[in-house]
Amino acid sequence: MFPKKTLFLGTALILSTLSVAAGELDAFVQARDGATACWSRSYSAQHLREHPHQQVTAMDLTVTYMEETAMSPDQYVFRLEAQLRDGTEGYAVGPCMAQGGKMWCGVECDGGGVLVSNRNGGDILVDLAAVGAIAMSTSCGEDDFDSGFSLQSGIDDKTFLLHSQPVQICEPARY
């Protein structure tokens, strides 16, 4: 009888942990198939003059919830797009998961990631410094599979305050 009780308690603990994690991510995007939220910011010329070491001139983040399919478990996926001062543009995609009341979104195979926290009014803070870098692709063609760059945390590229955008303009993240 002891093993059954232990199994029940262990299962209950795991399920309660999963529901807390889903609840934390629901603060960003509801756990409903195809539900999407997006945030964006284009930095003004004045802001960039005041932060001469900031390389990121614009950033967009989209997070979408995808229900379980025969090919994948239910999951939150992200697409992060960034434009740099030199005109370089890139994007990163991957899964998101709860981490201490925040949302961690990362690129598989040790491609780094970002830590995202909620702010007032639906805004979010994207923390690049928490992980240090994220791998950004510049194309998705087979010929250019390895093209891209590492968006590194720097003097003025540590955190990015992004503003909530209307759901109607959000294109769902695909992974």
Image (cartoon, helix red, strand yellow):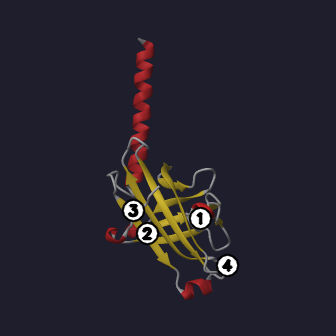
Q: Is residue 33 left or right of residue 101?
A: left
Query: Looking at the image, is mark 3 or mark 1 earlier in the sequence?
Result: 1
Q: Residues within 10 Å of mark 2 (few under 14, many from 20)?
A: many
Residue picked out by circle 4: 53
Q: CA distance from mark 1 to mark 2?
A: 20 Å
Residue picked out by circle 3: 172
Q: CA distance from mark 4 to mark 3?
A: 32 Å
Q: Nearer the viewer, residue 136 or 55?
A: 136
Q: Quadrant of the N terminus?
A: top left
Residue picked out by circle 1: 137
Query: Looking at the image, is mark 4 or mark 1 earlier in the sequence?
Result: 4
The answer to whether the residue labelled 4 contacts the one labelled 3, judged by CB atoms less than 8 Å apart, is no
Q: Give the amino acid at mark 4.
A: His
Q: Which is more foreground, mark 3 or mark 2?
A: 3
Q: Residues within 10 Å of mark 3 (few under 14, many from 20)?
A: many
The residue at 40%/35% (across/down) is 15
The answer to whether the residue labelled 3 contacts the one labelled 1, judged by CB atoms less than 8 Å apart, is no
Find residue 151 and report its horizontal and vertical position in percent: 63, 66
